[in-house]
Image (cartoon, rainbow, N blue to C red):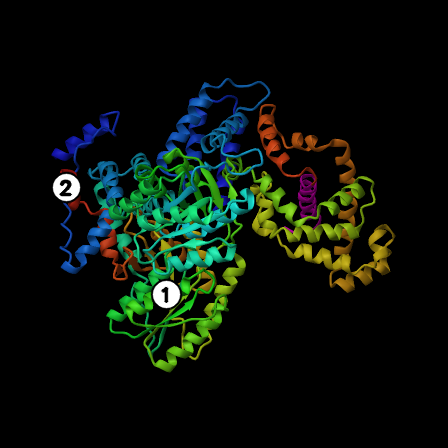
Amino acid sequence: MVFGFFRKKEKEAPAPEQAPPPVAAPAAEPPAEPEPEKKGFLKKLTRAISKTRMILSRRVLGLVGLGQKIDDAILEKLEEAMIEADFGVETTDFLMQLVRKAWKASEIETTDQILPYLRKDLHRRLTHRGNAVHFAQTRPTVILVVGVNGAGKTTSVAKLAWWLRRQGKSVVLAAADTFRAAAVEQLRTWGQRIGCEVVTGADRADPASVAHRAAERVLELGSDVLLVDTAGRLHTQKNLMDELRKIYMACAAKRIAGAPHETILVLDATTGQNALNQAQMFKQAAEVTGLFLAKLDGTAKGGAVLTINEKVEVPVKFVGLGEKMEDVQLFDADQFVEALFDLEDLKGQEAS
Amino acid sequence: MFDNIANRFTDVWRKISGTANISEDNIKDALRAIRTALLEADVSLQVVKNFTDSVKEKALGEEVLKGVRPGEQFIKIVHDELVRMMSEPGTLDEQGRAKLKFRGDRPTVIMMAGLQGSGKTTTCGKLAQYLKRRYKKHPLLVAADLQRPAAVDQLEVVGKSIGVPVFADRASTPPEVCARALEHARKGGNDVVILDTAGRLHVDEDLMREVQEIARRTQPDEVFFVCDGMTGQDAVKSAKAFDEKLPLTGAILTKLDGDSRGGAVMTVRTITGKPIRFVGTSEKMDGLDVFHADRIAGRILGMGDVVTLVEKAQTAIDEEKALELERKLLEDEFTLEDFLGQIKSIKKMGPMQDLLKMIPGASQLPLDQINEKGLDHVEAIIHSMTPKERRLPEQLNPSRKRRIAAGAGRSIEEVNRLLKAFEQMREMVQGLKNQGLMGRAAAWKLGRDKKKMISDQQKALNVAKKRAKANVRRAASDMADFRKQFGID
């Protein structure tokens, strides 16, 4: 009640920017204590989205915390507040669509039901395609890694290799980025650190041939996983996307049944609206099966994955949170959504 | 993505075009639409707000001009404001080169900083190439990225490909390497030193301190913030942090050859207050251009990018041939043979969808329906004619037409349509001859006040060669007529 009082006052005040009073959580159950090893991840993730959440909480929760009946005016205000909270147009549109639909279907009636509903619904949406890595029945598993220039592909390949190694799998890396200067050296360095063989081609060699040779090599060695690193390419460059298709086909044509078993698109979390186009085009060229959301350790929040998950139907599988090879985590929708809407933590933030 | 922006603005234009005067009320919708459009273009919210506020202020304060529709007047305000916000006078010299702070007493130091993957190393190479070619400088590239594996190798490969020396010391620390590089340059006769620093997150305090240390020890003359042109809302945070920590003198936006345009440019410019100096396109070493605010503004507003189109045309169209064509056209000697040559030139300029997008107003066209095959068919038909037939198409009798159709694998109707279109085009050119270029602009439904906008664009256009311009305009209208005649869409 106390908070309701505050909120009311806040709404009446003409300048909401002026230090709004702290907002506490509606009586939602406290989030489950994360396991100790996950704590670092959650902390990083929380920091990554904390700014969003702060504004979200103040402005949006100011609206949805109260148990008012939902009407068009309130939804419009909520939409406005989400834009203000820097959610991005696409994400806001998407979330508002969910809310409106649920409201029309009478699944939610009052404003305090909005957040729990979104939480549950987003969680379902982000997980129902399955976020686990798809391994081949009989080894080897072939994983193709693609993305635009500078998204962090090679580093992400290293992270994936490290993660796979930790799962006790033997890994071979294919340096199919024969275009960028020194990309092969970069991968080789990682290969040494992680302890896996790197198959390379000559400078400017046909990347498809490197993939082909790497596949041969992996069969020879009897390794568990082949990770294919490709050159960065803008999704608008048709010839490069055709080349990617060729690499994809080279992986697929091998004696390895069902290869590539995964095509991972590395997405820079700082990318704007363009992310959706990227996902669409890469899926067309190389049947992307999962996202690696890189650079989430900055201030970017990677909200784009919500729309990509929905429109391109590609789930997030990994999250990159730093420059070191161990800065990688399996995507955890629970934590992602919790971090996005986590209110308990807010009290501490506001207090400090 | 670009289509979205253009379309949205087109809607805004339509919305207020019919109204009588600019008022709080009718401007509200327009401003809102502009806000959405800019947000969709990845301009940061904060920047969008400032922008719409200043547009509103200007629009409301402005007297409604006679003879101009308020909608058009408003658009001009938006356009001018965009250009004003993004441009900075005095960044180009009279030759159109980027004006940089070169020094005489010691090698000029240019420092590059930015997030990981923004394209610093590639841009360093491009800039070195630019300085070498346009200024006859002797740059030295310095590998100050000791963080990422093989970053030094990458710069070395880049340096080798453009014939620029690279200074590196893997065993040292980045500030040390940079300081020593200056000495190295002085001895080696290099007059510019370009520091390729490691990519770093703006929240990484240790690394931000390191880059500050580099700046302190080398006292750079230019510090460029290199930013990925596809960056979204996050640009505001990184730009701010780098601007606070480093004495930035400008910014370079990279990867603008993708389909994301505009947004981050506006954000970085507004947040740092520093001019955008270059834009990076393509992975090739010559893919660096000086920044032109009006070009980006035009793109964001869906007004097309005529200047770029002209430049594209210039590279694809042989100027002498174009002159000859123009003479022929005006003297009514234009034949199907010439026509074929023109089609080939057009095709050389790239996919037609991309070209049409650059033409003002073309964003309203159903571009995805254009079938490039239409041009191929026309080519095939002309190829199936004898040289004489190409010169004198009016002499084609039914039997010849049948032969041509069979040869081209098309129907007789298509042959007829082509001939008819060709005839109409000739007539149209004759009409144009009398009308002149400005007449066409007028036909483009422009109010009096918007002429300033035109003249601004025209000024930019004049930078490009006049001949190519005429040719492109013609090509554009030909294309439109073609589409009509052949039902290509």
Asked if the stretch drawn in magenta spans residue B246, the answer is no
Residue at disc 2, secondary structure: helix
Q: Nearer the viewer, residue B336 or B262?
A: B262
In this rendering, the count of numbered labels is 2
Is B223 on the left or on the right of B344, as rendered? left
Q: Position of residue B43 (x, y in %)?
A: 40, 39
Any mark on residue A187, and which?
Answer: 1
- In front: B432, or B271? B271
**Going 50% across and 68% down the picture, which residue do you hit?**
A205
Type of the residue with mark 2 = Lys
Q: Magenta residues?
A: B468-489
Q: Residue at x 68, y 48 (%)?
A: B317
Residue at the front extreme, as displayed: B187
| Secondary structure mostly taken by the magenta-highlighted segment of the chain | helix
- Quarter holding the C terminus of chain A? top left
Quadrant the N terminus of chain A occupies? top left
Residue on which the image places disc 2: A347
